[in-house]
Image (tube, helix red, strand yellow):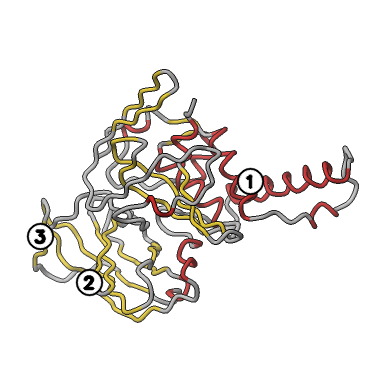
Amino acid sequence: MFNLKRLHIKGIVALVCTLSLMTTTIQQPIFADDWKDKSDLIFNSNSEVDQDLLIQFQIVRTGKSSQTKDVEFKRSDMGVVDVLYNAGANKKIKVIIDQSGTKYTYTISKDINYVKFPLQLGNGKYGITIYENVSGNKYKKIFSKQDSVQVYTPNAVYLNSIQIVDWKINDSVIGFMNQLVLDEKKAIYMRENNVTTITDEKYLEVQLTKKQITDIAYNYVVANISYDYAKISTLPPNYIPSIEATLRDQKGICYDYSSLLASMLRSQGIPAKLIKGYSSTTDVYHAWNEIYLTDEKRWIIVDTTYDAYMP
């Protein structure tokens, strides 16, 4: 369970948080206007892993499950796998994604529908296994499926809607992001043509770079989303961000900031990771983003939670 306090002293933000985890990511401080290549500053793991809890569980043999379960690889060429297991509200469910011995463990949300997870370990044979908690740290194997995966482009995985970056084209958040982009095109058109009003749709011909679109989303989140101090005290262990709630309430924790930004950018065709781990900006468990600028062919590190409270 999260335990987070924020201390804002002389313009410096300190995050105090404790959470068990398996892998860590270390990030160097990146400032709001610093878009230089920082890819070499990522250590240990820069993968998009939902490692909310320390998964050192014991696997036991029990009777067969009568619950509906399935694993679908039909969209694996896009870097995503669909997992279904409806075990009821009180069950803890884990999903392990294995590729050539490298394993990522995820907590699956309570859902009667398929839940999407990233296939980010490159091309090859993947194994997806569902486990259900029996008691304590004991889990039973429920279902397993394997298939060969060939992703059509390496960064496709970071464009998908997945459990922790959950967006749909008709979401109000995506409609809002589309409008922000249109507003920027209008502003550029009026500035370049020295006009104060727009009487036609020629502004739609304005071409924005991926960096410009990234700036639009980044600037909005940093300027408008406030940190939700009260939320952290009631956060469940299996918490999953809702971008609709974050935009509506205009507040959230670092996990919400990162999920919102990633969703806004993915909807615009910009690959974005949601990273959880440790960073040099704070000595506690944290969440931030890595964003791929297609125009410049490089990844950049962005921490909107930190930048929102910079002096």
Q: Nearer the viewer, residue 36 or 269?
A: 36
Residue kind at label 2, given as amino acid type: Gly
In space, the residues marked 2 and 1 are separated at their CA atoms by: 41 Å
Which of the two discs, 2 and 1, labels the residue nearer the N terminus? 2
Q: Give the side of residue 136 with respect to residue 304, left or right.
A: left
Which residue of the protein is positioned furthest toward the top in this rendering? 10
Q: Describe the element under mark 2 as helix, strand or loop.
A: loop
Q: Amino acid at mark 3?
A: Gln
Quarter the N terminus occupies: top left
Residue drawn at (28%, 71%) of the image: 128
- Please provide percent x and percent y for residue 188: 78, 45
- Characterize the local packing of mark 3: few (<14), some (14-19) or many (20 or more) Cα atoms within 10 angstroms: few
Task: Measure the C-alpha gap from mark 2 to mark 3.
Answer: 18 Å
Q: Which residue is mark 2?
A: 101
Marks 3/1: CA–CA distance: 45 Å
Q: Which residue is mark 1?
A: 176
Residue 107's spot in the image, x, y percent?
Answer: 28, 55
Q: Is residue 99 above or below residue 20?
A: below
The label on residue 58 is: 3
Q: Nearer the viewer, residue 75 or 293?
A: 293
Disc with the residue nearer the chain's start (3 vs 1): 3
- Indicate the position of residue 122 as horizontal and vertical percent values: 38, 72
